[in-house]
Amino acid sequence: MHIEYIIPDAWSIIEENWNPDHVKSSESLMSLGNGTMGQRANFEEKYSGATFQGSYIGGVYYPDKTRVGWWKNGYPEYFAKVLNAPSWIGIKVTVNGEKLDLHTCTTVQNFKRTLNMKEGVLYRSFEATLKNGMKVAVNVTRFLSLAIDEIGAIKYEVTPLNQDATISYEPYLDSGITNEDSNWDDQFWNTLSIADEDQHAFIVANTMKTEFHVCTMMSNQLFVEGRPLQLSRKRTEKSSYQGTVGNKQETITYIGHYYETDVKQGETLEIHKFGGYVSDLNHDRETLMTAAKTVLSKAETTGFDALLQQQKEDWAAVWAMADITIEGDVKAQQGIRFNIFQLNQTYSGKDARLNIGPKGFTGEKYGGSTYWDTEAYCIPFYMATKDQGVARNLLTYRYKQLDKAIENAEKLGFTKGAALYPMVTMNGEECHNEWEITFEEIHRNGSMVFAIHNYERFTGDTSYIPEMGLEVIIGVARFWKQRFNWSAAKEKYVMLGVTGPNEYENNVNNNWFTNYLATWCLEYAFAKAHQVKQEHATDYDRIIAKTGLTDAEITEWQSVASQVYFPYSEKYDVFLQQDGFLDKELISVADLPMSERPINQKWSWDRILRSPYIKQADTLQGFYFFEDHFTQEQLEKHFDFYEPFTVHESSLSPCVHAIQAAKLGRMEQAYTFYLRTSRLDLDDYNKEVEEGLHITSMAGTWMSVVEGFGGMRIQEGKLSFEPQIPDAWERYSFKINFRGQTLTVEVAKENTQFSIDQGNDLKILVHGTPVILSEHRTVVV
C-alpha cells in the first residue's frame, strides 16, 4: 500500500503532522461536496508547494477537442472535461508583512486536518513560525452547505503567539484558473465582468463553446475575539491574458478585498467568508449577480454558526438512513462511512439533470458526468438509502438522452432506431476518445436495461417501463440485434471486435459477459414488449407509433437470443472470458512479483494484452448480475478459475469478488476484498489517489456489506437475507428503504435482528425461511 498516514477513526478522516508529500493526496481524501458543487481540500491561504487546485460545479463542462495520434472514422469530436471553476476559497494572509505559506514556514507544529464525516465539515489547525520569526496559531473550519447548496462557508482564525502583530486578510475570487486535465491547454473560461459592493464581490464568467454562465461570489465579515470588526477595505485586482490564440487581451480575472489590523499577542482575528456559485442552470442568465446577492444575503442573515449547526443536522438526517455501523473493526468502519459520505456529497438526487461522475467533485480524470458505473453499481445504493424517486431520476436521465444514444449508434452505421449509450457523456453524446473503449466496450448498453430491471424488481414500481423504460429497452435491443452476426462456421450468432469489462483485453471476439448480457437484453425486451402490450395498451400504442416497432421485429429478437454462441472450456468446465483465452500463458497473480504491480504502471500495453491478467471482474460480473441463472457449483468453478488471474486494478472489481466470496462462504477472502474496496482510496491501493477519488466504486463497497455479508437479494418481490459476519467484527447493522418501509438489520455472531419502523407487516426471507415483521417489534433469528 502506498499511504498509511490516515489515522483510523470511526467518524473522521484525520491527518496529523505536517508532511508536504501528503498534500495532494489529502486534497483528494478530504474533498467536500453537496451534490450541486464540490472542491478539493486545497488550503485557503497561499501554498507554493505541489498542489492540485480544483473546484467544480455539477453539470458545467467543456468539450475539449479530441486528441489522438491516429484519427479513426467515428471518433467523438471532443472529450468532455469536468471544469476547474473560478476559485472562491482563497484568503491571502500576512503577518507583519510576511505571507503565511506552509511551504516556506521555518517550522510547522501540531498540524491536524480532520474531515468530520458525521457533520460534513473540514477542520484544520496548526502552529507555524514564519520566516520573519512570527509564530501564529491557525484554525480553519469549512463546509459546503446542504441547506443552501449554492453556498460554502469558511471561518479562518489567526492568533499571534509570540508578540503583537499586524495581520492582513485578503479574501479573493479568481477566474484566471486552468485545468489539470486538458488536451490542448485551451482557455476554458471567459471572464465577462467583475464587481464589488460593500463586503461583497462577484465575477461573472462563461465557459467557452458550451456557454454556461456562472457568477462566482463572496462576502466577508471580520471579528476580533468574537467581536464584529469594522475595517475599511482596499480593492485589489489582477489581470491575465484571455482569448483565442492570436487574439488574446489582458482581462481582469481576480478581485480581492484587503483588510489590515493590529492584533495583540494571544488574541484571535477571524474572518467569515461565504462563497460559491450561481449558474444559468438554475437562474436567468441576465440576473445572475442579483441571484448571487440573494444567496449571500440568506447566508449572512443565517450566520456562520447557525449555518454550521444546520449542516450538522442535515448530515444527521442523511446518516439516519444511510449509515452502516461496524463494531470491533475501526478501519472497516472508517472505510464504509468514507464511501457513504462521498457518495452523498456527490449526488443528492434533487436534480435529474445531474449524475454521478467517476471522480465526483474530487478531480478531473476520466471526464464526463456519467459512465455505466451508475447503472451497474450506484443505483442499488441510492434505491436502498433514499426515496425511490432518486433512483428513478437516474433512469430518467438516461431516458432523456435516448435520442442522443440513437445518434451515437447512427454514427457507427446502425439503423432503425438502434441506440448505443455512451461510455462517457455529459449530454448524451459519446465523448470518450480511446477506440477500444468508445467503439468496443459496448456492454455498457446492457447495463442501461439491467438497471431498469433492477429498479422494477426492487421498488415494485411498474409504471416506469410503460412510461419511459420500454423505449430505452427497444433501442438497446435493436442495437444488439444488429451487432450480432451469423457465423456459418459455428452456426450461431457471434459478436466480434469487442472489449469486455476487463479492459486488459481489447478487440476480442465473443466476450462472454457481453454476449450473455446482450442475449438477456433481447429476451427481456421480448417479454416486456408483450407485457406492456397486454397491461398498458395506451402506452404501447404511443410507443409503437413513436418507434415503428413491429411484432415481426420482436420475434426476431427472441430468435437471435436463442442462437447465441458462448465460448466454453470442456477441460475446465467454465465459460471462457472470450475466444482464445486459453491460448494465453496462464500464470496466476500469486506468481507475479509485487515489484511489477500495478501492471498498468509497470508494463507496456502490448505485454498487458498478451497476459491473462484481468483488470476487473468480467465473466464474474455476469455471474453477479445474473446470479440466479447459475448454480452455486457453477459460481464456485468460475470464481476459482478467474479470481487467481484478477489484479483488481479497476476500482469496480473488488466489490464483486467480495460479494461472491461471501456467497461461497469464504468470509476471510470476502473480508480481504471488502477492505480493499472500502479503503481503496484511504490506503491508495492503486497509487493514484492524488488525482481524485473513485466515487462510483464506493457504491460497490456498500454492496459488499449489504449484498455480500448481509446476503440481501430480491426473491419473488421479497427481501431475502443470508447474513454472515467477518471474524474481525463484533456486529454490524444497516438500513434498507424498501417500498416505503425502513428495515433495520443488525447482525451479530450469535444472531441477526430485524425490525421495521412503521407501516404494514413486511414479509421477508431469512436463509430461505419466511419471517413476518411488524412495526416496533424486533425479530431475532
Image (spheres, rainbow, N blue to C red):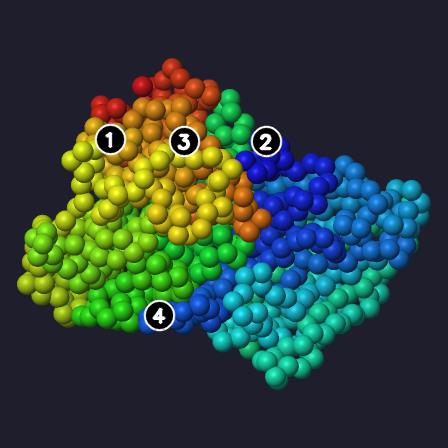
Name the one closer to the observer, 701 or 514.
514
Question: Which numbered disc flags the more N-terminal residue, 2 or 4?
Answer: 2
Residue that extends furthest to the right in the rendered view of this protein: 163
Q: Quadrant of the N terminus?
A: top right
Query: Is disc 2 surrounded by few (<14), some (14 to 19) or many (20+) residues within 10 Å?
Result: some
For numbered disc 3, what is the local secondary structure? Answer: helix
Rendered image quadrant of residue 772 = top left
In the picture, measured across the screen, residue 100 lies left or right of residue 628, that is right
Residue that extends furthest to the bottom in the rendered view of this protein: 247
Q: Are marks 3 and 2 in contact (CB under 8 Å)?
A: no
For numbered disc 4, what is the local secondary structure? Answer: loop
Rendered image quadrant of residue 216 = bottom right
Residue that extends furthest to the top in the rendered view of this protein: 750
Q: Position of residue 364 (x, y in %)?
A: 52, 58
Nearer to us of marks 3 and 2 is 3
Query: Is disc 1 surrounded by few (<14), some (14 to 19) or many (20+) residues within 10 Å?
Result: some
User: Pointer 2: what residue?
Assistant: 9
Nearer to us of marks 3 and 1 is 3
For numbered disc 2, what is the local secondary structure? Answer: loop
Q: Position of residue 114 (x, y in %)?
A: 65, 40
Task: Name the disc covering residue 590, or none.
Answer: 3
Measure the C-alpha gap from mark 2 to mark 4: 50 Å
Nearer to us of marks 1 and 4 is 4
Question: Which numbered disc flags the more N-terminal residue, 1 or 4?
Answer: 4
Name the one closer to the observer, 708 or 753.
708
For numbered disc 1, what is the local secondary structure? Answer: helix
User: Residue at image x 34%, y 42%?
Assistant: 612
Task: Name the disc covering residue 72, or none.
Answer: 4
Q: Quadrant of the C terminus?
A: top left
